[in-house]
Amino acid sequence: MADDRTVNFGSVLDRETSDRKVWLLVIPILALVIGGAVWAFSAVSRADSYRAEAERAATQGKELQKAIDERDKLLVEARADEGILKSAGQATGVFYGVAPEATESGVAIANPGEKAVKVYLYGLVAPPGGQEYVVAARGTSGAPKVLATVVPSEAGTAFVLGKDLPAGTNSIEVLFRGAGAQTLDGATPRVAARYPADENERGMLMQPVQAKARRGAGRARR
């Protein structure tokens, strides 16, 4: 009996020793597997993070390039505007009243080569309720193009740099129109100045636009 118990006890010890050996092998393997899975997950997460960061950087790069292109465009336009502003112009048209009660006056310095005009206005008044001042260029087609909306200073003055004038522009006009209107339908002309029709017209253009039209009408009646 004693011998049997000794043998059984020894068998148990042998099995426990064997199990410990197995676990000594299994645990490191499990640790390696788990560690590999964690590393792989971490690597995938880092890759996703790098990809997201790269996409974010690419988007920021595009936005930066767009901002640079816009800045360059504005610089080019600013230099062109500066050239026009410093230019003496080809001719200067004097504003004359179209409406009998007009108090406005000024000059329009023409730069046909750049399809531009510098407009200096004086004697502006507060527009009637619901109306606003606009400066427009009228061409040979007769259809005017609005160059700018004008807000008079406290002294009744204003400046407008008009660009991209329509082909055949022959006059610059100041009008009252409905505030916020998109067209000149129903607008009331106040003053107008001549714009050189060709490169031969230079110097001061003193002839009133409307006076020229009235004389032409008078000749037609005769």
Image (tube, rainbow, N blue to C red):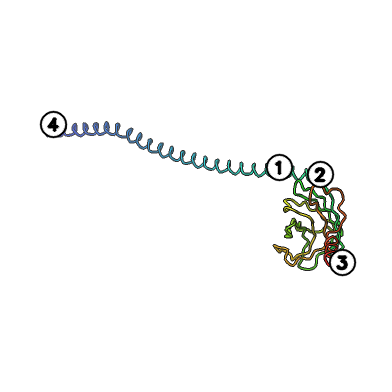
Earlier-in-chain disc, 1 versus 3: 1
On screen, 185 above or below 1?
below
Q: Amino acid at mark 4?
A: Asp
Circle 3 crowding by C-alpha within 10 Å: few under 14, some 14–19, many from 20: few
Question: Which residue matches tag 2?
Answer: 87
User: Foreground: 9 or 60?
Assistant: 60
Earlier-in-chain disc, 2 versus 4: 4
User: Foreground: 25 or 155?
Assistant: 155
**Residue 76 — which label?**
1
Distance from the alpha carbon under mark 1 to that under mark 3: 42 Å
Residue 155: in sight, yes or no?
no
Earlier-in-chain disc, 2 versus 3: 2
Earlier-in-chain disc, 4 versus 1: 4
Q: Nearer the viewer, mark 4 or mark 3?
A: 3
Whole-percent x, y for residue 77 in the image: 72, 45
Distance from the alpha carbon under mark 4 to that under mark 1: 107 Å
Q: Nearer the viewer, mark 2 or mark 1?
A: 2
